[in-house]
Image (tube, rainbow, N blue to C red):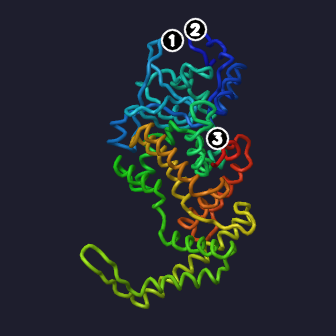
Amino acid sequence: MTFGPPPGGFPPPPPSAWTPPSEVEPALFEAKSREDWAAYFGTLAHSRLFFEIQKDKADATPSATYAVFGYDPRVAGGRIWAVYTEGMLPAPEPHRVFDWNYLEWFAKVWQPTDPPVIVISPGSPCEAFLPSAPPHSAAWARYGEQAPAQEQSPRLRTLRIGGPLYGPAAHGLACGALLCVNNDSFWNGMASHGEGYPRERKQLREWWGITSREEWLSALNGLLAAESHSRVWDFAMGLRRTIARDFGGHVDVGYWKQSVANVIRANSQGSAVVTEDGVTKTEPRPESEVEAGIEGVQRLIGRITRYEARMRADGVLGENQYVSSVAAWDLGRASNMARWGLAARFGTLKEAESAVIQAGRASALAYKSWQDFAAGFILGRSLHFDEEEFGSWYQNMVKAHRILVSGPGSPWLNIPFR
């Protein structure tokens, strides 16, 4: 049997002004134009295919799937299952949400009460009509079943339309690009559906403890204020900045550690604080507590310097450079948190865009360049997760960094940091 056109035949070729939103759609259109269905389904088999679901039922039972079926007068009976490639998704709406799966899944879950036709990206130049009932569905489902295992690898993905490429919003989005490259998402996907409504909700709940709009806003504001990482990191790195400023740049590690000990001991002696109610005295801290604190910060300094040495070897840091701040770890996540909240419908597109722009502005105040920003982000992520194993938490960011500093079309090469 044949695939592709509705009963009236193929739609006309796309207008010359048509710009495919991502790398998937032109491959589908070219294969469809040649009636090369093996190539068409081969492309689909490696793509996330999104479909609308019922939000209220997804909220009540997140583990189940409740598809929303559509209508198309070109199909007998009118009932269709509309499925979209990621670049063809409509803009997010408060009560309209989507999930996704791979090609073969649609054949496996089809029920006799479901529509007899699946339509890929309805109304687009890469549109195709697939019979959804067996035995016909086996002809296209096998492409998904035979596709290599879906392995996520870092890559730069850009929306050619539907996402900003320049300006304040694009700059703020680019601050989140390390995670986007690592997560195989569009770096400039402002109107984001992310990994689909159920997955975004689940990930925010499991990784962040976020289950409501209020919790999302609290987490987002903490990230934008660069207050979601350890204050001890800030203390240690801030002291190094002060030493570097006072002594001309280079900071001896031994001197840095000794300075930490001196400051902590001095701050532990107790002091008198003048308030409206008079003078309040603070008692000296126990010596054992003070020495334990010094030892902890000095161990942190050792971790920081060893990560920096590895980052120099991996091309993340320049020779003799060091990381000035890990605020980028929060600000880069803030850029993504804004989009995650939109995909989970905890926030609006307007709120997400405002937060992304704010993240970009704060980053430009805290750092001098994309290179400086990246080093701060990677060090913060490594201190938080990696436990000095130099494992995937670190290595994946180094891979993403290499892509962003060299890849054609990288926002870090096309958007000024300041």
> Label 1 to label 2, Cα distance in Å?
7 Å
Q: Residues within 10 Å of mark 1 (few under 14, many from 20)?
A: few
Q: Nearer the viewer, residue 387 or 19?
A: 19
Instruction: Estimate the x, y position of residue 166 in percent, counting from the top left.
Output: 62, 37
| Of the image marks 3 and 2, the number of the one nearer the N terminus | 2
Q: Secondary structure at mark 3?
A: loop
Badge 1 or badge 3: first in the primary sequence: 1
Residue 285: image tag: none
Q: Amino acid at mark 3?
A: Arg
The residue pinned by badge 3 equals: 157
Amino acid on which the number 2 mark rests in the picture? Gly
Q: Earlier in the sequence, mark 1 or mark 2?
A: 2
Above or below residue 357? Residue 123 is above
Residue 278 falls in which quadrant of the image? bottom left
Position of the N terminus by quadrant: top right
Q: CA distance from mark 1 to mark 3?
A: 34 Å
Q: Is residue 246 above or below residue 289?
A: above
Q: Residue at x 70, y 19 (%)?
A: 33
- Residue at image position (57%, 44%) is 173
Q: Residues within 10 Å of mark 2 (few under 14, many from 20)?
A: few
The residue identified by callout 2 is 8
Which picture quadrant has residue 308? bottom right
Q: Amino acid at mark 1?
A: Arg
Residue on which the image places disc 1: 74
Q: From this viewpoint, which residue is outermost toward the left?
A: 277
Q: Quadrant of residue 377?
A: bottom right
